[in-house]
């Protein structure tokens, strides 16, 4: 009976946890300092400290980064019921992993591909994974990162302003944020990297340009 009461008390305490206290508990269970978790999630340690003190709430993107770093479903961080707080095996499926942006449907590629495991809810037949090689998207994305890409051939650039997209410009692959500017009646597509040292690429109507996919999220990073 005493053992059952302790278990029930522990479940009740966890259900009453704030987000910050739950995050701190998960961090300490792994023996990590705030500095270590901030490094693994690539977020600011000072902001992480404010989250753990329940002074700030994470953005959707930051929540995903924390869950990825802690290797738990987001539901565990959000405390969606006692069952979610119990350790569970992550259910994964595999997607093709490309080393460069494919110039067609990923399922029809003739490349020798690796496969990369993603959480089941991230899997879709029109998704694929891409390993980055260059630093044009630093500090958001780093060389060696693996991102999840939604294959969206020929989506109109005006429909994805500011999104990180896998593009082909005159047959050359590039990963950049996409913007559209109008100069009179002429539409100009501007491709910008997050690295301030990377010059923007200006694409006019004479270029052979297409968006092959939209980066959805970061799914892998070497530490």
Image: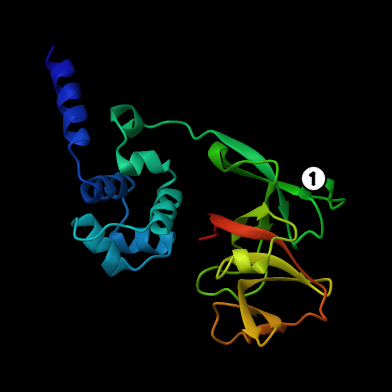
Residue 61 drawn above or below residue 179: above
Q: Position of residue 161 (x, y in %)?
A: 57, 69
Q: Is residue 15 left or right of residue 134?
A: left
Residue 13 drawn above or below residue 144: above
At x 32%, y 57%, the residue is 58
Q: Is residue 48 left or right of residue 134?
A: left
Q: Is residue 7 left or right of residue 197?
A: left
At x 66%, y 73%, the residue is 134
* Quarter where residue 37 is shown: bottom left
Residue 175 drawn above or below residue 19: below
Q: Secondary structure at mark 1?
A: helix
Residue at mark 1: 107
Q: Front-most of 146 and 207? A: 207
Q: Position of residue 39 (x, y in %)?
A: 40, 64
* Quarter where residue 124 is shown: top right
At x 69%, y 80%, the residue is 187
Q: Position of residue 220 (x, y in %)?
A: 56, 54
Q: Front-most of 170 and 123? A: 170
Q: What's the colour scheme? A: rainbow
């Amino acid at each position: 009976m005493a053992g059952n009461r302790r278990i029930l008390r522990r479940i009740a305490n966890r259900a009453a946890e704030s987000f910050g206290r739950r995050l701190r508990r998960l961090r300490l269970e792994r023996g990590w300092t705030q500095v270590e978790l901030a490094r693994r999630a690539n977020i600011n340690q000072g902001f992480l400290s404010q989250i753990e003190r329940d002074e700030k709430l994470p953005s959707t993107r930051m929540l995903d980064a924390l869950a990825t770093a802690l290797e738990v479903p987001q539901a565990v961080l959000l405390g969606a019921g006692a069952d979610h707080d119990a350790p569970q095996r992550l259910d994964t499926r595999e997607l093709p992993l490309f080393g460069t942006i494919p110039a067609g449907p990923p399922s029809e590629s003739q490349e020798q591909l690796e496969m990369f495991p993603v959480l089941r809810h991230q899997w879709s037949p029109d998704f694929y994974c891409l390993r980055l090689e260059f630093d044009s998207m630093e500090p958001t994305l780093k060389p060696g990162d693996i991102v999840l890409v939604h294959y969206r051939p020929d989506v109109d650039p005006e429909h994805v302003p500011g999104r990180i997209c896998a593009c082909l410009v005159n047959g050359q692959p590039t990963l950049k944020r996409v913007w559209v500017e109008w100069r009179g009646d002429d539409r100009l597509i501007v491709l910008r990297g997050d690295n301030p040292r990377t010059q923007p690429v200006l694409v006019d109507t004479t270029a052979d340009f297409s968006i092959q996919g939209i980066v959805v999220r970061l799914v892998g990073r070497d530490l």
